[in-house]
């Protein structure tokens, strides 16, 4: 079946010294050593593997609420130019050799909060994709277990953490503008703990400390579940850099979830692809799949706590399991995303299953058939195509053709005619001609996507395409993006028209933040839907329920209706 779609335990280095109290610029730096997996370590990847760019995950956007101490920033989608603040001074760097790996996984953070410890308030601002949002929830859980409480805003919190994205230059520069304000706070209040996590931290490492010497901790995404250990090093007077690639430990931290209905569940970390425009493999490391039993155990815990929908996350979700051992009698890998979906499907209390992000190179008919046959798996697929021109796809190193992408969509719609398809696309890639751009427009017109995340090409440090001589002018990027966005919105509006008058099953996620008289939720096809809260109903009875809603208004990316029955 697959062929017919086309070929295609942590240890830290010893402390180098105590932090100089007089000035952050004089602080010694400890480079945190590698950590190792507990029971099994995946082998080094051989050859090309799979995971698309960070932009493949639809960006998390909007404030998650000051009450939680977590804020998501839609920096990935920002288009305005931002200027980095200048930070004088340089921190001397001393890198200690990595200690040998420990044989057992690290223990879970101790629940000091239960003992009455109050370490002060925290604030997390999240830039970028769903993977970053999931990491922020885990880090918030660690902080609260340590005794921190959610802050009111980033300007008064005792610990400020920026979970960063480097997929676009403007998102990266926005981080520096935020850090400029916090650096001023740090100079006036040395007790402030300032942390940069995520992809910018991984990319810049010790250079980030030299640029912003007020920082206490720089940590890459692979170290998210080691936050407590790293903060303990900070508390001993050190500046810490944790960017060494390592096997990610099974995380038994209880995340501080933004939602009480829907939850992210990481199933594979990292990326083995080598797309010529993408920095993700350098900042998130190679692919590491979690064991199926650990994933199911987490989902069972979520369902027991009342969560009704989970989204399985991976930079390239279709690569799940290929770094795990085992071959079936039929000769295929023992662990695949298809097998994982079947394995978790019968978890009691779970109503809906989603997954993101897919890669056309590895999307199989077997997976499509499983999605059609498993009732809890929602009919929504996020499959980036990136360009509608085969020559550009080859230059990008994507490993598939436009023809293969069409066959995937045709097969999905053959099995699930009402399925929603969303995607990512990059315009103005180096050397892209007007004719090649027109082929991208033609593919968007032909497929009729429900949603497309669009971006103009942004050169990223260390990627091959950034050094190519045929870079396009900014004016060309802006014009192509404008034309594409207009088409995307028109096609989305056309796709939304099919909902008018239909009764859709909506999972209620909360109250519409712009209109407290309305519930807010999503259809199985991931359309955001609003409907009035019935008179006399409180703010919680419908939360987490599946409600039939008759759709009375349609817009490009959302719907409005009334509850029926």
Image (cartoon, rainbow, N blue to C red):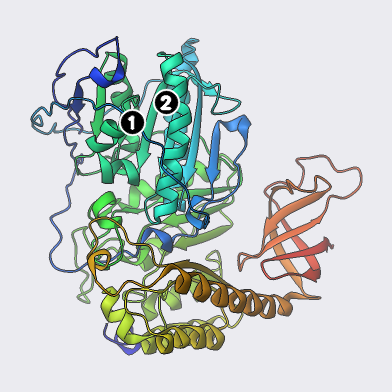
Residue 361 is tagged as none
CA neighbours of label 2 inside 10 A, class few (<14), some (14 to 19), many (20+): some
Given residues 168 and 535, the one toward you in this image is 168
203 lies left or right of 122: left
Residue 360 higher or lower than 210, as above or below = below
The percent coordinates of residue 535 (x first, y second) are 91, 47
The percent coordinates of residue 372 (x first, y second) are 51, 76
State whether residue 431 appears in this view: yes
Q: Secondary structure at mark 1?
A: loop
Q: CA distance from mark 2 to mark 1?
A: 7 Å
Residue 21 higher or lower than 397, as above or below = above
The percent coordinates of residue 140 (x first, y second) are 47, 32
354 lies left or right of 498: left
The percent coordinates of residue 262 (x first, y second) are 57, 49
State whether residue 420 appears in this view: no
Residue 212 is tagged as 1
Q: Which residue is identified by label 2?
A: 183
Going from N to C along the chain, the mark reached first, 2 or 1, is 2
């Amino acid at each position: 079946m697959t062929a017919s779609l086309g070929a295609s335990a942590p240890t830290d280095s010893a402390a180098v010294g105590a932090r100089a109290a007089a000035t952050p610029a004089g602080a010694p730096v400890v480079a945190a050593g590698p950590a190792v997996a507990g029971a099994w370590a995946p082998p080094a990847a051989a050859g090309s593997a799979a995971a698309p760019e960070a932009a493949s995950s639809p960006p998390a956007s909007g404030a998650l609420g000051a009450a939680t101490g977590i804020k998501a920033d839609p920096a990935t989608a920002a288009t305005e130019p931002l200027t980095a603040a200048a930070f004088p001074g340089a921190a001397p760097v001393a890198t200690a050799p990595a200690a040998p790996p420990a044989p057992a996984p690290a223990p879970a953070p101790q629940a000091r909060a239960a003992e009455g410890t109050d370490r002060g308030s925290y604030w997390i601002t999240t830039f970028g994709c769903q993977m970053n949002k999931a990491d922020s929830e885990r880090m918030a859980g660690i902080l609260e277990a340590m005794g921190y409480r959610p802050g009111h805003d980033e300007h008064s919190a005792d610990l400020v953490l920026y979970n960063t994205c480097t997929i676009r230059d403007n998102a990266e520069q926005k981080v520096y503008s935020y850090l400029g304000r916090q650096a001023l706070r740090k100079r006036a209040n040395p007790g402030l703990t300032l942390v940069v996590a995520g992809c910018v931290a991984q990319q810049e490492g010790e250079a980030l400390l030299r640029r912003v010497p007020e920082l206490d901790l720089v940590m890459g995404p692979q170290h998210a579940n080691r936050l407590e250990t790293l903060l303990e090093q900070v508390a001993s007077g050190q500046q810490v850099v944790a960017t060494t690639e390592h096997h990610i430990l099974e995380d038994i931290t209880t995340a501080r979830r933004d939602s009480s209905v829907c939850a992210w569940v990481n199933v594979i970390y990292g990326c083995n692809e080598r797309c010529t425009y993408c920095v993700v493999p350098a900042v998130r490391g190679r692919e590491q799949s979690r064991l199926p039993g650990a994933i199911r155990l987490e989902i069972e815990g979520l369902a027991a706590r009342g969560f009704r929908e989970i989204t399985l996350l991976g930079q390239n979700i279709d690569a799940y399991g290929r770094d795990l051992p085992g071959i079936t009698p039929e000769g295929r890998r023992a662990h695949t995303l298809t097998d994982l979906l079947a394995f978790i499907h019968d978890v009691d209390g779970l109503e809906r299953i989603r997954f993101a992000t897919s890669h056309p190179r590895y999307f199989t008919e077997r997976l499509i058939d499983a999605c059609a046959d498993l009732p809890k798996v929602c009919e929504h697929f996020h499959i980036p195509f990136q360009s509608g021109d085969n020559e550009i796809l080859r230059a990008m190193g994507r490993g598939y053709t436009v023809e293969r992408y069409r066959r995937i969509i045709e097969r999905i719609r053959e099995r699930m005619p009402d399925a929603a398809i969303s995607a990512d696309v990059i315009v103005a890639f180096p050397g892209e001609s007007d004719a090649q751009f027109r082929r991208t427009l033609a593919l968007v017109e032909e497929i009729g996507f429900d949603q497309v995340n669009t971006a103009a090409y942004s050169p990223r440090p260390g990627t091959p395409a950034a050094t190519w001589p045929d870079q396009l002018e900014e004016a060309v990027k802006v014009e192509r993006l404008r034309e594409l966005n207009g088409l995307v919105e028109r096609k989305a509006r056309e796709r939304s028209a099919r909902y008018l008058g239909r009764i859709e099953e909506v999972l209620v996620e909360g109250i519409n933040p712009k209109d407290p008289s309305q519930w807010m939720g999503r259809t199985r096809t991931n359309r955001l839907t609003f409907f009035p809260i019935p008179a006399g109903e409180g703010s919680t009875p419908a939360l987490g329920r599946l409600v039939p809603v008759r759709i009375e208004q349609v817009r490009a990316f959302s719907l409005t209706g009334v509850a029926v029955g």
